Amino acid sequence: MIEETIISKAIIESYLHELIDSVESEIIVGGGGPSGLCAAYYLAKRGLKVVLFERALKLGGGMPGGGIMFNRIVVQEEARDMLAEFDIRCQEYKKGYFVANSLEASAALTDKALKAGARIFNLITIEDVIVREQQVAGVVINWTSAEMAKLHIDPISFKSKVVIDATGHPCEITRIVEKKSGGRLDTPSGKIEGEKSMWADVAEQFTIDNTKEVFPNLYVCGMASNAVFGGPRMGPIFGGMLLSGKKVAELIAHKM
């Protein structure tokens, strides 16, 4: 006999236990796209307490849609070893160009991050940032559904030592800090430079080079790096996203 109330209690109790235990952590990742999932995986693999918030129902960011809804992505030679590490199958299309199934890639990144110990909460929006003495100290979250319905529901706060902005093109976390902190960002102009038009060859390396700390205890990776530092977008090639997520994890691990 199956009792519906036992199912309900199992879901509520297990979720709340993990949520309560995540109120204070070492790293908060905002955004569950490829760079955010990579960062969460590598940091959790080092034994650090990592919490990731994703505003959408499903993880993967722009990866699942591939190019124009053809569920394939391309990864360049420099990131091929990372595909193997995440057990993502690929085929060489031309020398230096490797094609992978975008759905498999998204699922594999999510699976590896979770099994490494990262706490992942979907359907959660980061609507504000905690700043203390000109240092980021956590985030303020709410249900994405409350935001979409424009309900006046007060949020709750989660503290961490470091926050990673992996929110992609909108660079939402950095934008909040820019608007509310009153301090300068570590960019040429001291503010968000804005994303430029597509140029994959430049954008891939630009993403990796500009994966860094942009405000005390706030790091950017993936497309958020491009938007914050004024790089071009690159379309459905994802090597830079993977390498950026790995780099930000290495930077933070070294700092901590």
Image (cartoon, helix red, strand yellow):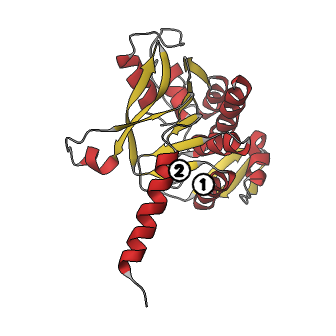
Residue type of the residue flagged with mark 2: Ile
Q: Position of residue 179 (x, y in %)?
A: 35, 18
Residue type of the residue flagged with mark 1: Thr
Between 238 and 145, which is closer to the camera in this rendering?
A: 145
Q: In this view of the protein, can residue 128 be seen by the observer?
A: yes
Q: Which residue is drawn at 48% across and 40% down?
A: 23
* Disc 1 to disc 2: CB gap under 8 Å: yes
Instruction: Classify mark 2: residues with Cα within 10 Å, few (<14), some (14-19) or many (20+).
Output: many
Distance from Cα at disc 1 to Cα at disc 2: 9 Å
Q: Where is residue 156 in the image (x, y as percent from the top left)?
A: 36, 38
Q: In this view of the protein, can residue 196 be seen by the observer?
A: no
Q: Residue at x 48, y 37 (%)?
A: 167
| Helix, strand or loop under label 2 | strand
Residue wearing tag 1: 110
Q: Is residue 86 left or right of residue 235?
A: right
In what quadrant of the picture does the C terminus appear? top right
In what quadrant of the picture does the N terminus appear? bottom left
Residue wearing tag 2: 120
Residue 155, placed above or below residue 124:
above
Residue 223, placed above or below residue 119:
above
Residue 200 falls in image quadrant: top right
Checking the image for residue 194, the label placed there is none
Q: In this view, does 87 lie to the left or right of 156?
A: right
Q: Is residue 174 left or right of residue 111?
A: left
